Image: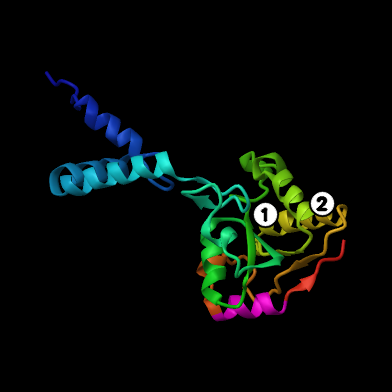
């Protein structure tokens, strides 16, 4: 007679928690849990503490919407940034890639996503009212640096239409990037050229 294998409840809870990570299924989560408990308990504790500190202390910058430990992040607070330029990117990783080009000294707005109706992400989820309010309070050229994917192009077109209706100058980084490419995967030289060759969006 066989009996079902009973798993300790805390272990089961750990495996379930690890499955919240993107691309991690039941088997991968199980392997991670076993590894942490068997091989690296110190690492597991460090991970837990780091996660707790991050969740407790990291918020969104009130100006650019990027992750920050303060109400206004260091980039937005810097007097060395050109306030007449505002680059709109999809994710924080794209902002970091833009900074690595060392050719852009303006400010940013991070959408934290892109328009994707199939995933339930619309204009409201991207907090576009904050973007509009910012450019109206501080007139500037808005540089659209969304990815050259179907969703990224749709987001750029939507933003261009929205901002043109507010009488805001809008440009889009040039297609020096491969179609379907992600900013964080592109070398800094290619991205720098795309920024320098940006052109105004006409709707």
Image location (x, y in percent) of residue 24? 38, 45
Q: What stretch is highlighted in magenta?
A: 189-197
Q: Quadrant of the image for the C terminus?
A: bottom right
* For residue 127, above or below residue 9: below
Image location (x, y in percent) of residue 12? 26, 30
**Residue at the outermost top position:** 1
Residue 114 lies in the magenta stretch:
no
- Judge the density around disc 1: few (<14), some (14-19), many (≥20) Cα neighbours within 10 Å: some
Distance between the Cα atoms at labels 1 and 2? 16 Å
Q: Name the residue under label 2.
A: 162
- Along the viewing direction, whichever of 74 and 200 lies nearer the viewer: 74
Left/right of residue 77 with respect to residue 174 in the rendered view: left
Q: Mark 1 points at which residue?
A: 151
State the SS at label 2: helix
- Mark earlier in primary sequence (1, 2): 1
**Residue at the outermost left position:** 1
Circle count: 2
* For residue 16, above or below residue 132: above
Quadrant in which residue 30 is drawn: top left
């Amino acid at each position: 007679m066989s009996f079902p294998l009973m798993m300790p409840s805390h272990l089961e809870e750990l495996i379930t928690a690890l499955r919240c990570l993107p691309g991690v299924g039941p088997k991968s989560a199980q392997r991670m849990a076993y590894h942490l408990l068997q091989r690296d308990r110190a690492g597991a504790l460090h991970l837990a503490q780091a996660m707790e500190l991050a969740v407790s202390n990291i918020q969104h910058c009130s100006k650019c919407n990027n992750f920050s430990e303060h109400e206004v992040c260091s980039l937005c607070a810097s007097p060395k940034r050109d306030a007449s330029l505002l680059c709109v990117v999809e994710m924080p990783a794209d902002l970091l890639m833009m900074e690595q080009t060392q050719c852009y000294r303006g400010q940013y707005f991070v959408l934290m996503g892109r328009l994707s109706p199939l995933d339930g992400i619309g204009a409201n989820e991207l907090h576009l009212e904050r973007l509009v309010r910012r450019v109206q309070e501080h007139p500037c050229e808005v540089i659209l640096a969304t990815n050259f994917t179907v969703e990224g192009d749709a987001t750029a077109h939507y933003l261009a239409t929205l901002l043109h209706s507010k009488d805001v100058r809008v440009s889009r980084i040039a297609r020096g990037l491969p179609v379907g490419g992600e900013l964080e995967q592109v070398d800094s030289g290619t991205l720098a050229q795309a920024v320098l060759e940006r052109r105004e969006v006409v709707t």
